[in-house]
Amino acid sequence: MTKKRISELEAAFLKFELDSQDARRQKTALQDLCRRYRGGHVLPPELRRDFEVHVGYLAVNGRDPKVVRWSLNTIARLGTQQGAANSVTAALVRHGDSPEIVGAAIAALAALYRGVIPALPSNAPVPPEVRTLAAMQTVNAAQLGSTQLKIDIDQADADLLKLALIVIGLNRDIQNLLHPSFDNGQIVRALGQHDDATVRQYSVWAVIENRVLGLEHLGIPFERTEHEPENVQAKLLELGASTIIDPTERQNLILAGSSFASVLAREGLAKGLLRSFYDGLGDIMLDWVRTEAEHRVRVLLAEHFGRYADRMPSYEEMAFELALEGGDLRRYVLRGADGKPLQRRLQIEEPVVADLFADDVRTQRGLIGMIQEEAKTKVLILAATPDDQSRIRPDKEVAELRERMAAMPSQKRSLAFDSIYATRLDQIQQELVRQRPKILHFSGHGAPGCLMFETTDGRTAPLEADLLARVLKGYRDIECLVLHACYAEEVARACLPYVACVVGSTTTVNDATAPRFSYLFYQSIAAGMGYEQAFEMGQTEVAFMSRNAADAYKLIIR
């Protein structure tokens, strides 16, 4: 198979998603990358190593098991023995009690070592049939020696059956893999009736992915979709949207699926429609995107409109409308339009996008630069030092923070800082909407239950905890709130329902040590650490100067 390069635009998009710190988005990006490699696409050589390092880090340090598993699957596609074997082994040691991760790790090792799997860690004993099925995901059966498996599908546990379905779905199977009297298509159809919902989900996935299998091998009638659990619904809708031949049956399934209560199910339907357009679909899609409230579904619909905008004028109009909303919706429209006439029109005609391309509107470079710039995590620092309070110097702290961040040789998670000084109450929501930050940092004075902002003439304007909580409830996009102020714990707890993690202080903040916390906290995030680990690094840095000052810091997690 001739290898085709993944475009720079698509690579930048995938990197953006991996940098997002959002487990669902990271998993989806890893799945997309694996799918592209299976389809004969590869990353440009100058980018592959960067992806290998990043994915290896997620395989070891990812907190979501699905991110770990898909990181290992990705390593099996693009990793090298020298660059990724240690990450795979470390993941296997850390997650030896997870059958799915163990299977993915063995598959990755089989790929890296070309079928000659090294000795596995002692904490992860693997039955021979699991080892064989896992390795078959990435190497030819002939490389593994004997591939005769004695598995009774009526008695085998769900984890073993899922492994077998993965092998079949990846087109790595040999005929009669699980039973001498039945071919694999028959087995897939039978497992579609299994008691375990995840096995049923994998059976549908195998039909989606396997080049030989078709709808005749589906063990669940589409009429039963609404009665299945949401994970099975999602796969059935993804399959049906892209493969049902009968136009009426297909139309009815899409129309019903777009109204399902489950977000996961609607997301699956939207994924299927990324590979599908036919006459009569347009009205359903236009109605759906106008009523869909869930962001993770809307971005996939945006990509659909970008991909098929040349099919009908109303699609192109909707693609422009979604692109004008900016943020993720714009990125997904551009992703769908990659290499299509709409891409050039978006560059030249859409004001919001065109402004970001500068003089480079005739190439993809402007698009790539835009995605890379937006891939940075925005940190908005609101500083206030009212004249009627004791004097502190947040401006000096921010200036040195910028210098230290600029001195970092490389950043796994790029941060972009913006700061507002002498912040007034009426500026808070305005700046959130304008800057769209993921991290909000307040530097200034505090008292139990409030933070001290400023009036237009420089006097104290207190912001009560419940009002800040209302601001965050409305904005919704803050991942981490840092309250670098005295007695901020009460404010922190009031905001916690609307932010995943908050840094506050139980007592006073030591002005001499406070900058040291900020420096290490943000440097650690830029190095790829999660918020909890970055907090520990910052707190320890303060402890070098004062244990009491370090103990005042508090991390509160929702």
Image (cartoon, helix red, strand yellow):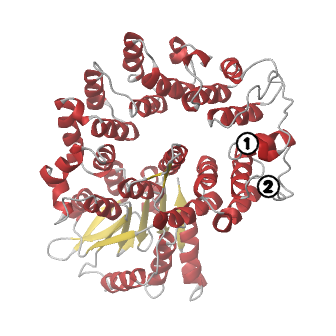
Q: Is residue 49 visible?
A: yes
| In the image: residue 364, left or right of residue 248 | left
Q: Which tag, 2 or 1, sits closer to the chain's start?
A: 2
Q: Residue at x 31, y 48 (%)?
A: 338
Q: Camera-side residue: 1 or 204? A: 1
Q: Position of residue 233 (x, y in %)?
A: 52, 24
Q: Position of residue 103 (x, y in %)?
A: 73, 45
| In the image: residue 399, left or right of residue 352 | right
| Three-letter code, disc 1 | Met
Question: Which mark identifies residue 136?
Answer: 1
| In the image: residue 255, left or right of residue 159 | left
Q: Quadrant of residue 537?
A: bottom right
Q: Position of residue 95 (x, y in %)?
A: 73, 53
Q: Is residue 382 visible?
A: no
Image height of 100 relative to 418, above or below = above
Q: Camera-side residue: 321 or 444? A: 321
Q: Residue at x 40, y 40 (%)?
A: 296
Label 2: element kind: loop
Image height of 180 relative to 249, above or below = below
Image height of 219 relative to 393, above or below = above
Q: Give the distance between the C-alpha atoms of the residues marked 2 and 1, in whole angstroms.
A: 12 Å
Image height of 88 relative to 295, above or below = below
Q: Position of residue 175 (x, y in %)?
A: 73, 27
Mark 1 nearby-residue class (10 Å; few <14, some 14–19, many ≥20): many
How many dots with numbers? 2
| Three-letter code, disc 2 | Ile
Label 1: element kind: helix
Mark 2 nearby-residue class (10 Å; few <14, some 14–19, many ≥20): some
| In the image: residue 339, left or right of residue 89 | left
Q: Residue at x 27, y 70 (%)?
A: 453
Q: Camera-side residue: 415 or 315? A: 315
Q: Which residue is mark 2?
A: 117
